[in-house]
Amino acid sequence: MTVPLSTTDSMPTVGTIRASGPSFRDGRGLDRVLVWLTLGFLVAFSALPLVYNVVMSFQSVDLFTIASFDRPFVGLDNYKAVLSQRATGTIVRNTAVFVGLSVALQLTIGFGLALYFQQRFPGSTWLRGLFLAGWIMPGLVVGGVWSWILAGDFGVMNWALQATGITSDKIFWLSDPSIALYSVIIANVWVGVPFNMILLSVGLAAIPDDVYEAAEMDGAGRIWRFLTITLPLMRAQLGAVISLGIIFTLQQFDLFAALTQGGPSNGSNVMQYWSWELSFQHYRIGQGAAVSVLMILVVICVAAIYVRSTRHEHAA
Amino acid sequence: MLRDERLTQFALLFVALAMVATYMFPVYWMYVTALKTGTEITAWPPSFWPANPDFAAVEVWQRMRMGTYLKNSAIIAVGVTAIVVVLGTGCGYALARVRSRWMDVALFSILMMQVLPSSLMITPIFVSFSQIGLLDYPRTSVILAQAAKVLPFYVVLTRATFAQVPRELEESALVEGNSRIGAFFSINVPLARNGILVAALLIFLQSLGEYVYSRSLIQSRALQPATVGLQSFMGPNTSDWQGVMTYAAIYVTPIILFFVFLQRQIVSGLTSGALK
């Protein structure tokens, strides 16, 4: 398993220079320093806050105790307070719907587009790349543009739906509590489709043409080829894209801030927005930390499954 | 036979163009709205091409104080990119070159830190930064927090690039008496240049659009970046859509241009790094 940078048997000349043990000149020391530069920074600004977050979730933290290093510990009070609120059920359900629907739609549309652009025609690669423009735009700007498109009174979406006869009344996308969440999902799918499509395209390109040709000679139709060749061969890729989709969707914050601010009456609130809201708008920082800890656990579990599964692929 | 082939190609291209156009509609709508004047914004049915195109860039720029906001965005993005490139490039290289259990652990930890959502990390970051007095330097606070957020992504991307540099070149440089550091700067970095530049550009663009940390850590209006500024003009009862869309257009046009010119490199950089 261990592959050192260069072994003495393959490079005898270098080996003699390196025999003096780990040092800057022979390199082992260098590699370690390089990795620790990054790790040190991440420990200071990610890992330590992460630990501190857990500590705060067991403390009473508000505007009066924020500066103190000696806050009263309150056991599980923050968690109990957070979980017993009336809004909690709604917010948990919203988070599940937001993640589930976003990932399913991004994946379906992204896969469809990837399959389409896999066909050879002039400009196919370049046109496919254009989709990433949606991914690279700042989330706040995307949210701003969508809140104008979805505006209740003069939004172009309502005009399109009415003009095509799909609805007769204007839909209040952002102010109707039962619809607001779906507005954010629409915008989030728009942001996520390009990334799904590009990653799935890589997987599709890796399937050798002759597999398809052989199946075609055996008389397999398009749909049959998709079900028996494409899908099974794309399993690893699909798994990766789904896990990354869940991770990215749980990171989505900007669209909520720009479109609905979690409202109306928590109708579109999700855990990652709620955590921020508790800390920065209600100043119940201990509770914000508790929500944050719970969600970070979820994210880390998904990520660990993903990383483990890709590591497996590489080892195999 | 050949004619048929060409016909299919054109049909495919036509449908593809239609799909790109549909997807790009929000971007188009942003520009069209920015060009509309007065009552045309609220015209019903909406017009899809401005009757009297007027890009009120100068007026919006001054009224919404975009100069200050964009300057702050640029300061934050440059600061983040500088930290990330200085710290992360070597790490990406070392992780690409050395395979051992410890390196695997390091890589795993870095990957795990990549997935932590900013909106969940901001609570402990805010409290700890305020306790150690960092919040007196709000933009620096944002730069440090955002650098920690994007550093793992940069490491993953550059690691994939360095993995493509042939080992033999580095080894022959070592034989010729170069030190490891010397070989790193004279062989690996130049050969991985494109990948490093694309990764740095992605970090820069991402940080140009950073919102959560800036919103939470920067109180003073004069120090806030363009995202927070845009949010402040978009209250629940916004009617100044022309102003907001003009602001948005000025803000993202450079980003979109950057992207269109470097599209191919960005796509290949992303695809090589993201799945490994």
Image (spheres, coloured by chain):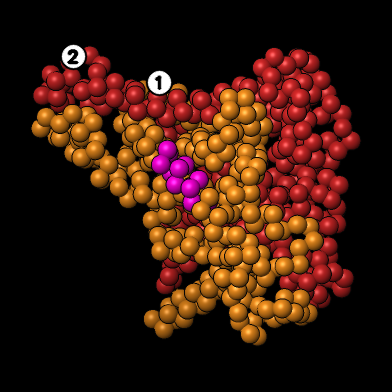
* Front-lying residue, B244 or A230: B244
Looking at the rendering, the stretch of residues picked out in magenta corresponds to B73-84
Chain coloured red in this rendering = A
| Residue plotted at (73% across, 34% down) | A279
Task: Name the residue that disc number 1 marks.
Answer: B102
In the figure, B179 relative to A23: above or below?
A: below
Instruction: Say which quadrant the N terminus of chain A sits in.
Output: top left
Say what amino acid the circle numbered 1 marks.
Trp
Judged left or right of residue A113, residue A99 is right
| Residue plotted at (30% across, 45% down) | B192
Farthest residue, direction right: A86
Percent position of residue A120, x then y: 43, 67
Instruction: Say which quadrant the C terminus of chain A sits in.
Output: top left
* Front-lying residue, B111 or A6: B111
Chain coloured orange in this rendering = B
Say what amino acid the circle numbered 2 marks.
Ser
In the drawing, what numbered circle is on residue A20?
2
| Residue plotted at (78% across, 44% down) | A269
State the SS at label 1: helix
Discs 1 and 2 lie in a common subunit: no
- In this rendering, does residue B172 appear at all? yes
Judged left or right of residue B170, residue B130 is right
In the figure, A125 relative to A165: above or below?
A: above
Distance of label 1 from label 2 (alpha carbons): 21 Å
- In this rendering, does residue A243 appear at all? no
Subunit ID for the residue under disc 1: B
Subunit ID for the residue under disc 2: A
Farthest residue, direction bottom: B51
* Magenta span main SS: helix
